[in-house]
Amino acid sequence: MTAKVHIMLKNGILDPQGKTVHHALENLGIDQIEEVRMGKLIQLQLGDISVDAAEKIARQACTKLLANPVIEDFRIELVEEKE
Amino acid sequence: MKFGVIIFPGSNCDHDCYYALKNVFSQDVSFIWHKEEDVSKYDVILLPGGFSYGDYLRTGAVARFSPVMKAVVDFANMGGIVFGICNGFQILCEAGLLPGALMRNQSLRFVCKHVYLRVENPDTIFTNNCEKGEILNIPIAHAEGLYFADEKTLSELNRNNQVIVRYCEPNGDISQEINPNGSLENIAGIMNRSGNVMGMMPHPDRSAEEILNSDDGAKIFRSIIGQTLEAA
């Protein structure tokens, strides 16, 4: 099982990095994009455990360390490996 | 007074703080390795600037789980004086000893220069040698100094006079143009509600004596030490 943790700045918090990248894309002629926001993707390799257990561990990792609730939201995506 | 300067892996202003306290202000000061679990013999704990744990994940996010930080939190909750400079401020926010968070500078650049700070609250452990509205010339050196807090927290900080210094023009005016990092309301340093924990992005340790172009940082140290300029 792999937990993919997506961490993004909360809505409404200015993301100067995303803004700069957006600007660069516009300069390249890719100007149909309305907004760019950047975040982090953290992959947690969890071995052979249940969805519930994986969700619990990933959530704990996020609330304790991976995300700062003052500025960031997180989303956990669980991916089961194919045999 | 006994001062302790914590060394995290990646701290790089630990010696600046130690030097200022020992050589400039003749204080009793020791280094505290981040693996220590007891800080009760100290009167003041300093968290110095630097790049603890390489700033991985978020600035201060990993350092706050160093063994010593549990002791620092207990020390602060018992009323002990804790002062964080730059990375130290970031660690105190991550540890929950101070509200809010420090984010990437709006310019996305590392900014290293002297700035002016207006003292908003001189009735604190950390600024009692200053006048209200006094302007201090103290350098900054950071890439993650944009102070952010939600609206509720910000209004509480203002209502309780917890904002200690703001970035200002040389004449003391607060403007967006002079804001070096995009901090909300030009906030450069804050303290906790009970007034025993303070964090600031600018470096009083780098402006503690005349040879460093400004000795305004000495006022912060002297406030903490509890001695007036005249007595020194």
Image (spheres, rainbow, N blue to C red):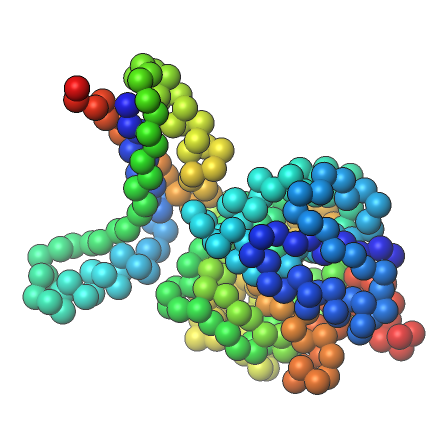
Quadrant of image for the C terminus of chain B? bottom right
Residue A51 located left or right of residue B30: left
Q: Is residue A69 above or below residue A54?
A: below
Work out whether residue B133 or residue A75 is closer to the camera in this orientation and state it.
A75
Work out whether residue B222 or residue B186 is closer to the camera in this orientation and state it.
B222
Can you give x and y, in whole percent of width and height, for residue A30 in the image?
Answer: 9, 61
Can you give x and y, in whole percent of width and height, for residue A2 in the image?
Answer: 28, 28
Residue A29 located left or right of residue B185: left
Question: Residue, x 82% and y 51% (percent of image)?
Answer: B43
Question: Residue, x 37% and y 65% (percent of image)?
Answer: B108
Residue B185 seen in this snapshot: no
Question: Residue, x 33% and y 55% (percent of image)?
Answer: A15
Residue B178 located left or right of residue B41: left
Residue B85: image quadrant is bottom right
Q: Is residue B186 above or below residue A79?
A: below
Can you give x and y, in whole percent of width and height, for residue A33 in the image?
Answer: 13, 55
